[in-house]
Image: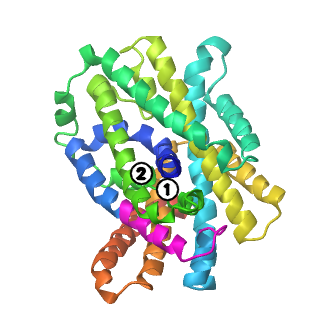
Amino acid sequence: MKFFYAVSILAGTMIGAGLFALPYITTRVGMWVILFYFLIIGLISTAIHHFFGDLALKTEDNLRLPSFAEIHLGSWAKKLTTCTGIIGLSGSILAYIILGGEFLSGLFEPVFGGGAFEYSLLYWAVGAALIFFGIKAIEKIELLGILGFVMVLILILFRGWSEMDAGTLLQIGEGFEGDLFLPYGAILFSLWGAALIPEVEEKLTGEKEKLKWVAPAGVGFAILIYLFFIFSIVSITGTETSQEGILGLMGHMDNGVIGLALIFGILATFTSFITLGLTLKKILWYDLGFNEKISWGVVAFAPISAFLIGIDSYIHVISFVGAMLLAVDAILITVMYQKYKPAKYKIFTYPIICVFILGIIYNIIYNKDIIIGLL
């Protein structure tokens, strides 16, 4: 059961905001491109999580990535991972706030009125309050959320079978001449749970030898859910697929099924919101030595402040976090791992580092106008 819960924590954190962007992105680039990205990024993500798990076994408990970086690379690495960790986790929480508001709005707006903005504030307020609880307060909810959402996907598949056209999956993206790198950041984001590896290691007390199997099990399970979700949504809505996936089903399925999908969508994103919020809180508290209440204050108010100033496109948020901030963390984890392995392992680690460096360079060039505007 410890192993089962450990996998559910890792997979449950991955299966969040990134999931809902994937059908829309698939319609932009085509199914074969998406499958290629899942193969490559899936293997790389599994490797990174394995690297970090190996490092976790060599490092004392109750520490997070910034302290790992300081111990294994030096103070400069701690400063860098502290910046990427705080911004990256805050960005991830922001994505959940945006998406959670859209789901709550789709569920309750017809009855109570209001808009996605107001429901995002409600979603944030409840989540910020629950971040006071520890990992044990949500691990079973995380598991139930995953199982519940899988059941809803099966229901969507069953109820929407008559409207499904599997051929649509092969036709979408035909003749596409746009950005073939569009899926990179979003898929990396959707397969990233390295921040939770120390939590997972602590969960496996007495059975830490099983940690090496958690990454492939968690990543593999997440990919299966993603492909199932893409097939279920895109084969029904085709080119009409909405950016968050579920709301595009309106007009194709009855309100009861859509309501269930929204409920479990809220649950799936909400548990990830809380889990990542707890992780960021512990980085500030354990690694940086902030007061617990101050740590919570940063976790609670940094993401909502970004939302209030107008950063409200969750696809842009997850793409930026994945392609830029998570890539930096992945490079540092790989460099740390190299220190404890023979030189022959560099034939595997160097290509991984090159992939992330190229991804960072591309995204700087692609988003240069936005970056210049911010500066």
Viewer-nearest of discs 2 and 1: 2
Judging by the rendered image, the residue that carries numbered circle 2 is 218
Q: Nearer the viewer, residue 190 or 101?
A: 190
Under circle 1, the secondary element is: loop
Instruction: Report the colour scheme.
Output: rainbow
Tag shown at residue 73: none
* Quarter of the rendering containing residue 335: bottom left
Tell me the distance, in whole angstroms, between the alpha carbons under discs 2 and 1.
9 Å
Residue 307 in the image: x percent, y percent?
A: 65, 44
Position of residue 34 in the picture relative to residue 149 (left or right)? left
According to the picture, the residue beneath numbered tag 1 turns out to be 193
User: Residue 322: x percent and y percent?
Assistant: 46, 57
Could you tell me which residue is drawn at 48 percent across and 69 percent down? 52
| Residue at image point 22% right, 39% down | 173
Residue 293 in view of the camera: yes
Q: Magenta-highlighted stretch: main secondary structure?
A: helix
User: Looking at numbered disc 2 in the image, what kind of residue is underneath it?
Assistant: Gly
